[in-house]
Image (cartoon, rainbow, N blue to C red):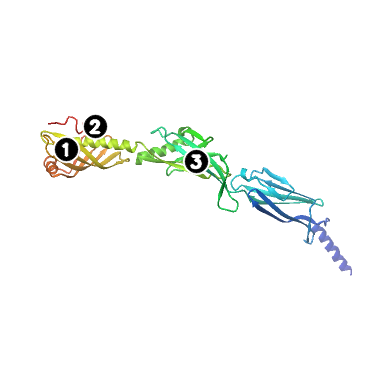
Amino acid sequence: MKGWKINIIVLLLACGFAFGCDTKPSFVVASFEVDQTSWDSLFVRVDFASVNRLSVATPVIPETRVYTVFGSNFDTLYVGDQPSIPIPDRQLEHREALRVEVCAHFEGQSACDQRIVYASPKKVGADYVVDFPLDPPAFQKGFIELASTLYRQIYGTEDWELIRKPSGKPLSVVVYGEGAPTDYVRIPINRSETTFDLSRFEGYRNVRYQIQSALMDADSAVVFFELHAETGSQSPLVASERFVLRSKSEEERYGEVQQLVELAGAQILDMVEGRFGSQRAYVFINEWRYEALQKQYSAEFELHWQGAFRSRWSDLSGQLLIRADGTEGTFMYLRGSENAEDVWLDKVKQNIIELEPLFDQTDLNTNRKRN
C-alpha cells in the first residue's frame, strides 16, 4: 500500500514537470481557409478551439477577431473584423503575393495564423513605334512613340480585360545587337514620345562595337529594340522592333556597282573595238552582290557595242570581281555573239583578264570615237 502511494506521487510530479502547474486549455486556430471569390474579394473561413492537456479540442467562439491583409511589401491592404474582404487588385502587381492573417482573443489568450493568396495576372500592352536611325551612318539617334495599356486576366477564364490606360507601369527599351543580348543599352521611357541618343547611355560602347563588327563582316547589322514593363519582380517583354542597318543602302550599293561595271566595260571595250572605235555602247547588269568581308563586288554583266559607220551590234557577257575602290579587278569572259567571240579570241586571247584601276577611266560613251 505504501509503494502504491509513492507511485502516485511520482506520477503527479511527472505531470507537473510535463505540463507545468498551469493546466488551462490552449486557445488555437482549428481551421483556416481563404476563398478567392474574385480578384477583388476574399472570404475567410476560420474556426477556433480550446485544447486541453489531453489534446481534446472543444470549439469556441473568440471574444474578438481581426483580419489583416498585407501586400508583398508588407503594406496593409485591409484591417477589419469581417470575413468578407475587399482587395484593391487593380493597383497590385502581377501575381503579387498577399498575406492574409487572422488573430483572435479568448479568455486572455491569443491565436494567429496566416495564408498566402495571389493577385491577378497582369500584362502591359502597347502601340509601339521606333524610328531608327535618324542619323545614318552614326546609328545613335532615334525616336520612340508609345501608348501603353494595362490588362488583367478575367477571373476564372483565359481572357483579358483592360483596367488602365496608360498602364502606369515603369517602362524601358533594351537595345542590343543580334547575337549579343547581354551587351545592351537600357532607355527609360517616361512619356509617350521619346527622342534618344544611344551614346548617352551606359553600355553604348559595347552596342556600337557589335554594330560596327557586323557591318565589317556582313555589310549589315541587326539591332533589336525591346520594350519591357516592370511588373513586380519581373520585367516581361511587351513588344519588339527589329532593324537591319547598312553602311550603305541597297540603292547606294547598286549605284556603286553600276559605276564600277560601266568603268570596267569601258576598259574592256578598248580591248575589243575596231580600229575606228565604236559608235555606241552600253552595259546591262544581270546580277550582282557585295561581299562585305572582302569589300568587293561581284557582278555578271553584258557589254553591247556598235562599231563605227553604223556597223552591226556585238555583245559579250562576263563576270566582274573588283574591290569597292576600283582596284584588284578581274573580268572572266563567259560568252558572246559570233562577232564578239571572234574578236575576243583574236585580240584578248584569254578567258580571264586583270583590269587596271578603274577610277581614272572614262565611262562608256565619253571620248568614244564617233562617225
Which disc is residue 359 wearing?
Answer: 2
Which disc is residue 113 wearing?
Answer: none
Which disc is residue 305 wearing?
Answer: 1
Residue type marked 1? Trp
Residue 117 is situated, as x and y percent measured from the top left of the image, at 64, 51
Q: Earlier in the sequence, mark 3 or mark 1?
A: 3
Query: Is 33 on the left-hand or right-hand side of 337?
Result: right
Seen from the viewer's position, the closer of residues 42 and 204 is: 42
The mark total stands at 3
Seen from the viewer's position, the closer of residues 213 and 142 is: 142
Q: Earlier in the sequence, mark 2 or mark 1?
A: 1
Query: Is 181 on the left-hand or right-hand side of 349?
Result: right
Residue type marked 3? Asp
Residue type marked 2? Phe
In the rendered image, is residue 297 in sight? yes
Query: Is 308 on the left-hand or right-hand side of 103?
Result: left
Seen from the viewer's position, the closer of residues 326 and 248 is: 248
Say above or below: 44 vs 344.
below
The quadrant where residue 168 appears: top right
